[in-house]
Amino acid sequence: MLLLLSTGASAADFQGRARLWVGPAFDSNAKRDFVSSTVATQPDLFLFGSGQLEGILKLGERVRLLGSYDVGGRKFVFAPTEDTVVQAAQLEGTVTFANYFAVGLAGHARDRRGAERDYTDLVGGAVVDFFPTPSVDMRVQVSAHRFLFYNRFSYSFWGPDGTVSARYRFNRRHSVSVFGSYNARTFNGLARHAPGPEGAEPPPDETRFDPVFGAGASYSFRGPFHFSFSYSYTDNQGSNMYGERVQRHRLNGTAAFRLPWALTLLTSLTWQPTVFLDHVYLATNDLTVVEDDENVSSLTLKLVKPLNKYLDLDVRYAGYLGFLPQNDFLYLRHVVSLGLAVNF
């Protein structure tokens, strides 16, 4: 959808799109449980629906506004406690000056309800962009972050977020990107200390604090097929909370191919080795994970077939695998869905 609004000397240019996706699905581990090798997980069927709106508004040559809104839900047949509704919104506005810079405000909000993981995640702040040549662009973003975890409020936190990112495009097909981030999280609960010797006086109470560092790099190719590879590292070893000191590596490869009969195949493979520095897993790390981007290794496949200008049929598979070597627990999950998408 393209809308052009003329206002004489200046022009307002709006581009937007909408998408609705619905269908049935199967989940082999509806409760997302880590289990031992002798314990089975609970499979279930569910119905899903999701909608997406996004748009970009350009006011003249220097002002740009962009926004998006997503909503999705799942209704399980035999495990209604796992029903979920997730909403997310993003808004950004920037003004270009001196030909090479842009400044503005950006924020996003995410709200998830259901399956005993109700939370609201709010991030907002200032951005500065630098684009000295068509091949180079950089961004610095400083934000305030508030995370509210309603089922266990002591795991809610607040603090500043800082991110620096840069991208270099060799040509129309090849590009590389890097980023670094720092998140200082002060929690609404006290830190839990490691068990001390019997009879020893416990340490004084202190508020939990997690200094979280992140960094990563990626390569992208766009040509007869699309391919990207990325590596990122997350470090929370400075946490004063026993059991929450974690180091995580993430390697991800994605690819998209055109197939005969107007089919498109998209696939993604992620490997996420995690080191728990206290040699204990308390199942509370990274409560802000997105709905189907879990903190375990995964393989996803998506096959899309356009039916006409507005309708797509797609079949999806996602498999997840994780290990807890300290207690010999296993996380295994398979999700298969058949969806019909309407595009505007």
Image (cartoon, helix red, strand yellow):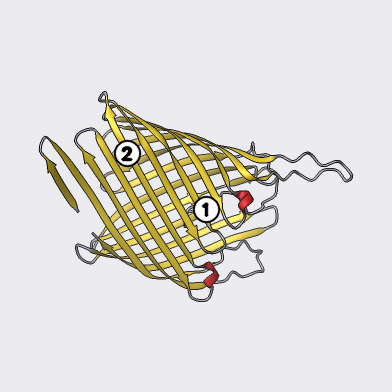
Q: Residue at x 52, y 72 (%)?
A: 80
Where is residue 158? Give x, y as percent.
Answer: 55, 42
Q: In this view, which residue lies farthest toward the left?
A: 8
**Residue 93: mark:** 2
**Label 2, residues with CA under 10 Å away: few <14, some 14-19, many ≥20:** many
Vertical relation: 77 (above or below) 162: below
Where is residue 213? Give x, y as percent.
Answer: 55, 36
Q: In this view, which residue lies farthest toward the right?
A: 199
Could you say whether the residue bearing mark 2 is in a helix, strand or loop?
A: strand
Vertical relation: 37 (above or below) 129: below
Q: Nearer the viewer, mark 2 or mark 1?
A: 2
Residue position marked by numbered label 1 in the rendering: 297
Quadrant of the drawing holding the N terminus: bottom left
Could you say whether the residue bearing mark 1 is in a helix, strand or loop?
A: strand
Where is residue 54? Give x, y as percent.
Answer: 30, 51
Relative side of 298 to 12, left or right: right
Q: Residue at x 38, y 40 (%)?
A: 106
Q: CA distance from mark 2 to mark 1?
A: 35 Å
**Residue 204: mark:** none
Name the amino acid, label 2. Gly
Q: In this view, which residue lies farthest toward the bottom?
A: 78
**Label 1, residues with CA under 10 Å away: few <14, some 14-19, many ≥20:** many
Name the amino acid, label 1. Ser
Q: Report if the CB atoms under discs 2 and 1 are less than 8 Å apart.
A: no
Disc with the residue nearer the chain's start (2 vs 1): 2
